[in-house]
Image (spheres, rainbow, N blue to C red):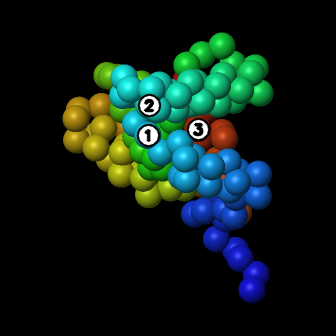
Amino acid sequence: MIYLDNAATTRPDLSAVKAAAQFNESLYYNPSALYREGLSVRKELNAAREFICRSLSSKHDLVFTSCGSEADNQAIFGTAKRGAAITTAGEHAAVYKSFAELKNRGIDVSFAPLKKDGSADVDSLLRLVA
Protein backbone atom coordinates (compact mmCIF):
# COMPACT_ATOMS: atom_id res chain seq x y z
CA MET A 1 0.00 0.00 0.00
CA ILE A 2 1.18 3.51 -0.77
CA TYR A 3 0.27 5.88 2.06
CA LEU A 4 -0.58 9.40 0.88
CA ASP A 5 -2.15 10.98 3.98
CA ASN A 6 1.02 12.32 5.61
CA ALA A 7 -0.65 15.69 6.13
CA ALA A 8 -2.90 14.01 8.72
CA THR A 9 -0.41 11.67 10.34
CA THR A 10 2.99 10.28 9.43
CA ARG A 11 4.54 6.93 10.26
CA PRO A 12 6.88 7.58 13.18
CA ASP A 13 10.56 6.79 13.05
CA LEU A 14 11.44 3.46 14.71
CA SER A 15 13.56 5.21 17.36
CA ALA A 16 10.52 7.33 18.33
CA VAL A 17 8.35 4.21 18.50
CA LYS A 18 10.88 2.53 20.82
CA ALA A 19 11.14 5.60 23.07
CA ALA A 20 7.35 5.87 23.30
CA ALA A 21 7.09 2.15 24.08
CA GLN A 22 9.53 2.59 26.99
CA PHE A 23 7.40 5.37 28.44
CA ASN A 24 4.18 3.42 27.91
CA GLU A 25 5.61 0.31 29.57
CA SER A 26 7.55 1.66 32.52
CA LEU A 27 7.42 5.47 32.71
CA TYR A 28 3.67 6.01 32.58
CA TYR A 29 3.45 7.87 35.89
CA ASN A 30 2.04 11.37 36.29
CA PRO A 31 4.97 13.78 35.72
CA SER A 32 3.24 16.39 37.92
CA ALA A 33 3.01 14.04 40.92
CA LEU A 34 5.29 14.39 43.93
CA TYR A 35 5.99 10.68 44.44
CA ARG A 36 9.31 9.17 43.31
CA GLU A 37 8.09 7.61 40.06
CA GLY A 38 6.33 10.81 39.01
CA LEU A 39 9.42 12.87 39.75
CA SER A 40 11.47 10.40 37.67
CA VAL A 41 9.13 10.86 34.71
CA ARG A 42 9.27 14.65 35.15
CA LYS A 43 13.08 14.43 34.98
CA GLU A 44 12.88 12.42 31.73
CA LEU A 45 10.32 14.82 30.28
CA ASN A 46 12.49 17.83 31.11
CA ALA A 47 15.51 16.11 29.55
CA ALA A 48 13.50 15.54 26.36
CA ARG A 49 12.34 19.18 26.38
CA GLU A 50 15.95 20.40 26.79
CA PHE A 51 17.14 18.07 24.00
CA ILE A 52 14.51 19.41 21.60
CA CYS A 53 15.30 23.03 22.50
CA ARG A 54 19.02 22.42 21.96
CA SER A 55 18.30 20.68 18.65
CA LEU A 56 16.30 23.72 17.53
CA SER A 57 18.83 26.19 18.97
CA SER A 58 15.97 27.60 21.03
CA LYS A 59 16.24 29.25 24.42
CA HIS A 60 12.47 29.60 24.70
CA ASP A 61 10.02 27.41 26.54
CA LEU A 62 8.74 24.36 24.72
CA VAL A 63 5.11 23.39 25.14
CA PHE A 64 3.93 19.86 24.42
CA THR A 65 0.40 19.51 23.07
CA SER A 66 -1.73 16.47 22.37
CA CYS A 67 -2.27 17.20 18.68
CA GLY A 68 -1.81 19.68 15.86
CA SER A 69 -5.23 21.27 16.34
CA GLU A 70 -4.46 21.99 19.98
CA ALA A 71 -1.12 23.52 18.97
CA ASP A 72 -2.84 25.65 16.31
CA ASN A 73 -5.39 26.89 18.83
CA GLN A 74 -2.75 27.69 21.42
CA ALA A 75 -0.70 29.67 18.92
CA ILE A 76 -3.69 31.54 17.47
CA PHE A 77 -5.64 32.33 20.64
CA GLY A 78 -2.46 32.92 22.63
CA THR A 79 -1.29 35.70 20.34
CA ALA A 80 -4.43 37.30 18.88
CA LYS A 81 -5.64 39.58 21.64
CA ARG A 82 -7.11 42.49 19.68
CA GLY A 83 -6.80 44.34 16.40
CA ALA A 84 -6.41 42.31 13.24
CA ALA A 85 -5.42 38.78 12.26
CA ILE A 86 -4.37 37.65 8.79
CA THR A 87 -4.00 34.18 7.31
CA THR A 88 -4.55 32.51 3.95
CA ALA A 89 -7.71 31.03 2.46
CA GLY A 90 -6.01 27.63 2.24
CA GLU A 91 -5.49 26.93 5.91
CA HIS A 92 -6.27 23.65 7.66
CA ALA A 93 -9.81 23.47 9.05
CA ALA A 94 -8.51 23.83 12.62
CA VAL A 95 -6.83 27.12 11.73
CA TYR A 96 -9.75 28.36 9.65
CA LYS A 97 -12.25 27.65 12.45
CA SER A 98 -10.03 29.39 14.99
CA PHE A 99 -9.85 32.49 12.79
CA ALA A 100 -13.64 32.37 12.38
CA GLU A 101 -13.91 32.36 16.18
CA LEU A 102 -11.55 35.35 16.37
CA LYS A 103 -13.93 37.16 14.04
CA ASN A 104 -16.82 36.27 16.38
CA ARG A 105 -14.78 37.82 19.20
CA GLY A 106 -14.52 41.12 17.36
CA ILE A 107 -11.09 40.78 15.78
CA ASP A 108 -10.75 42.02 12.20
CA VAL A 109 -9.91 38.82 10.32
CA SER A 110 -8.64 38.73 6.72
CA PHE A 111 -7.97 35.72 4.51
CA ALA A 112 -5.43 36.22 1.71
CA PRO A 113 -6.50 34.39 -1.45
CA LEU A 114 -4.64 31.52 -3.05
CA LYS A 115 -3.21 31.39 -6.53
CA LYS A 116 -4.50 28.87 -9.08
CA ASP A 117 -1.74 26.42 -8.11
CA GLY A 118 -2.89 26.49 -4.47
CA SER A 119 0.01 28.52 -3.13
CA ALA A 120 -0.48 31.72 -1.15
CA ASP A 121 -0.92 34.90 -3.16
CA VAL A 122 2.01 36.68 -1.54
CA ASP A 123 1.20 40.06 -3.12
CA SER A 124 -2.31 39.96 -1.64
CA LEU A 125 -0.91 38.84 1.69
CA LEU A 126 1.56 41.73 1.73
CA ARG A 127 -1.23 44.21 0.93
CA LEU A 128 -3.19 42.92 3.91
CA VAL A 129 -0.19 43.27 6.19
CA ALA A 130 0.66 46.81 5.02
Left or right: residue 123 compared with residue 97? right
* Amino acid type, residue under disc 2 in the picture: Gly
Circles 2 and 1, Cβ within 8 Å, touching? The answer is yes
The residue labelled by disc 2 is: 38
Residue at the spot of label 1: 29
Would you call the spot at circle 3 few (<14 residues within 10 Å), some (14-19), or many (20 or more)?
Answer: some
Which numbered disc flags the more N-terminal residue, 1 or 3? 1
Q: How crowded is mark 1: few (under 14 residues within 10 Å), some or many (20 or more)?
A: some
How far separated are the C-alphas under marks 1 and 3? 46 Å
User: Left or right: 76 with respect to 119?
Assistant: left
Quarter of the view holding residue 122? top right
Q: Return the residue nearer the eye: 13 or 71.
A: 13
Taking depth in this image into account, of 107 and 75 the one nearest to the observer is 75
| Residue identifier under label 3 | 125
Callout 2 environment at 10 Å: few (<14), some (14 to 19), or many (20+)? some
- Quadrant in the picture for the C terminus: top right
In the picture, the quarter occupied by the N terminus is bottom right
